[in-house]
Amino acid sequence: MDAIEQYTDLEIEVVGLSIVTRTIDSIVNREVLELLDSSDSTEVRFPTAIHQKLFYIIVADFLSERSDPALTREKISCVGLLDKVCSRPLLEVEQSATDLKAAQQLFKDWLSREVVRDIWMPSLNKTEEL
């Protein structure tokens, strides 16, 4: 029997949630970014360009890096782990995962939103929509 097979689905969920929360803690690291609150939104600023690049790398890992099947029984991204937990939370007691499910849905909606910006291209001497 493989070592991973001896763990229950609940134990695997706990490991998955641990992976997700540790990665989120790395993303929302106050040494890497600064959150500036205003009345209707929050602005994110980075102390240096290196901090900004590190932030992007960690977010990209969150979205696409695959976990070790020895930890989670499958190669799955943190977003996939979160989707899996929210679709069938084993730790849930009396709707305790409601806030997690709502936050996960807001995040998925935000990720799927298309953003269009006008970008000035000096070498072409014109503005283009991207």
Image (tube, rainbow, N blue to C red):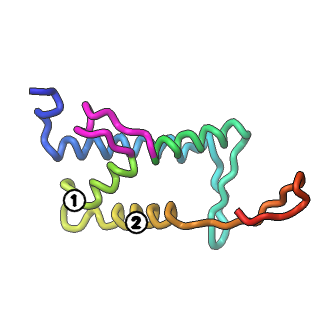
Tell me residue 86's x, y (percent).
Answer: 29, 59
Q: Quadrant of residue 130?
A: bottom right
Which callout, 2 or 1, points at the residue further toward the start of the chain? 1
Q: Residue 21 location in percent, x, y?
A: 39, 45
Toward the viewer: 70 or 128?
128
SS label for mark 1: loop
Which portion, as a residue range, is magenta? Answer: 64-77
Q: Residues within 10 Å of mark 2 (few under 14, many from 20)?
A: some
Q: Name above or below for residue 82 compared with residue 99.
A: above
Going by the numbered disc 1, the residue's amino acid type is Arg
In the rendered image, which quarter is residue 100 located in?
A: bottom left
Q: Is residue 91 left or right of residue 29?
A: left
Tell me if residue 25 is in the magenta stretch.
no
Q: Amino acid at mark 2?
A: Gln
Magenta-colored stretch includes residue 73? yes
- 77 or 58: which is nearer to us? 77
Q: Relative to residue 108, is residue 3 depicted above or below?
A: above
Is residue 4 found left or right of 118 in the rendered image? left
The residue identified by callout 1 is: 88
Task: Give the residue displayed 73% in from the left and 40% down from the top.
Answer: 48
* Identity of the residue furthest to the front in this view: 124
Q: Kindly report the secondary structure that dominates the magenta region of the rendered protein.
A: loop
Which residue is disc 2 drawn over? Answer: 105
